Each structure stands twice: as structure tokens, then as C-alpha cells.
Image (cartoon, rainbow, N blue to C red):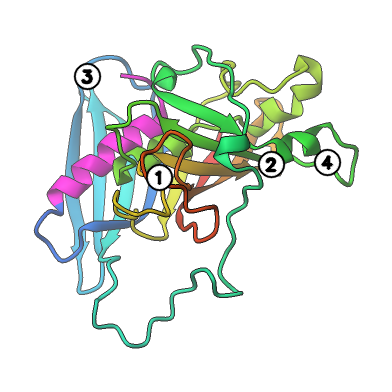
Amino acid sequence: MDSHLGYIIGLTINAFTQSQQATQHEDPMLLTTYFLRPAIQDEFEIRVNTVRRGKQVTVLRASFIQEGSERVSTTAIFTDLSVPVTTTNDRTLRPPHPLAPQIPMYSHPAATPLVPEAPGWNFFPRFTALRDTFYDAQHSASPPQSGTKLGHWYAWKDKREQITTTGLAVFADCFAPLPRVLMEPELGELDLCLPRVSITLMMHIEFKACIPPPVSVHHSPRAVAVYNGGRLVHDPMMRHDTYVELWTAPRMPDDELPDGGVDGRTAVQEAQDGD
């Protein structure tokens, strides 16, 4: 097991989901996690308690425990994100509505360069990382055209793998943190897989929509778009913030069904990390 907060959050979401099966509130809506102590590669226990169960939401708390001590603490709110079939007054903003949020990606996966693989995380070789070159150009530009944002397409290499709610937390914590982006001129090239300068200490996640079914012709069942940026860095420990958005992705070049284009993508998750 990796001492990777996104991975641990994924395990915790799985525990929450199991505890909410056959209830009115099976979908995660909000989740806040604090990394209290480093996790180790050993047996673990996740204890889930119900704080409050209401008509619209259920509040849960979980403790990730190893060797008798709480290492990660998580509070979550679960609800029902499904849209009733009989809804006649749907106010959901989605494409092609002109006010619908647009995916912050400019390169299609079929025309995006691969990120070189390196042992940054033990699980990294399991998926393909594609970097949006639009943001690379911003990093090398001079102010005010320069920026600190990044965009990646992540896809499981195994075509049998699918994007799940549990896995979203893992992808939300796979990003180059702001200090690493600022060090790019010194490194010569931004490598997502280089060792982290710090670990994620806190993550707040908002789930905006349910994951589309794998039979959708407009979405890849095994890929997501990950957009991230940050604005604050403080010495002496390079404490910083990171804002992450996860979006559905178009069909990958080697997916079986035809590509549906980048229009119509859905924001499925937003996360804020504190390092």
C-alpha cells in the first residue's frame, strides 16, 4: 500500500459506500480528509461511524487506523445524486447550454504527448498520463502570459479497468504541486513523476455529478481529465495550496467505440489540497 493520501481516501470512500448500501443516500457529495500521521505498508482498519442521518443527507466519519493509532481522519456527507426520470423542471447546467461550465482542456488525448514514466508512485505504471501542451506553453512564457496551471489526461492501461468513485480520489491526488511547477526553469522540464517536495496533508472533495455509464459513446470508461493550479506558496516548508478539477474524458484513441469529441464533458469532482 502506498502512503498516498488519494489512495487512502479511495479506500475510505469504499468503506463509506459499503456502509451506505441499501440506504437513501448512496452517493458521496462532500468529503474532507486530514492526514494526521504517515501510513505504512501494513494491515489497516477503517472504522465508520454515522454522525447524523437526515432526510436529504447523511453525515459520516471514518478513522484510518494502523498499529492502534488514527492516521487519517475523514468526514463525509452522502446524498442521492441521481436525477429522477420523471423530472420536468431540470435546472442542471450541461452542454450545449451557453452557461454550462466548459472543460479546461485544450488538447485532445489523441494529439497529446505522453508523460515519461518514472517511479514516482508505485501504482503509476498502471495508467497512461498525457499532458496538455497548452499549459506547458504558459510555463515558459513571461508574465502576464505565464501561469501555474496544468492539464493531464489519465487513463488506465488495462482496458478492463473502469473509472469509479473510489478511484477519483487517487487521480485527484496525482498532480505536480505548485513548488514543483515553479522549479521547472531550474529542472529544465516538468516531470510529473519526480519525487514530491511535500505530501498532501488535507484534501476537501466535492462530487458534482455521477460518473457516466461505461456504455456511453461520448465518454471513456477508463480515462479522466485532471486540471490543477495553485496560487499560494509559503516558506520555510513550502506550504502551498492546490485546486484540482476532474472531468470525464472523450473516448481514448484505442477505445473500442468511436470518439464523441470533447464537447459534453462533465465535471465529476473538485478537490482542494493543502500541502
Q: Which residues are magenta?
A: 1-19
Where disc 1 sits, the SS reads: loop
Where disc 3 sits, the SS reads: loop
First reached walking from the N terminus: tag 3 or tag 4? 3
Q: Please state which amino acid type lies under the numbered disc 1.
A: Ser
Q: CA distance from mark 3 to mark 1?
A: 40 Å
Residue at image position (86%, 45%) is 145
Residue at image position (48%, 50%) is 247
Residue at image position (40%, 48%) is 32
Residue at image position (39%, 26%) is 157
Q: Residues within 10 Å of mark 4 (few under 14, many from 20)?
A: some
Magenta span: predominant SS is helix
Residue 99 location in percent, x, y?
60, 74
Mark 3 near mark 2, Cβ–Cβ under 8 Å? Answer: no
Q: Please state which amino acid type lies under the numbered disc 3.
A: Glu
Q: CA distance from mark 2 to mark 4?
A: 9 Å
Query: What residue is shown with label 3?
Result: 67
Residue 148 higher or lower than 98, as above or below: above
Q: Which mark is residue 146?
A: 4
Query: What residue is shown with label 1?
Result: 220
Residue 143 location in percent, x, y?
90, 42
Where disc 4 sits, the SS reads: loop
Can residue 203 be seen here? The reply is yes
Extreme-bottom residue of the structure: 88
Q: CA distance from mark 3 to mark 4?
A: 47 Å
Q: CA distance from mark 4 to mark 1?
A: 31 Å
Magenta-span inclusion, residue 9: yes
Q: CA distance from mark 3 to mark 2?
A: 39 Å
Tag nearer the camera, 4 or 1? 1
Q: Please state which amino acid type lies under the numbered disc 4.
A: Ser
First reached walking from the N terminus: tag 3 or tag 1? 3
Query: What residue is shown with label 2?
Result: 149
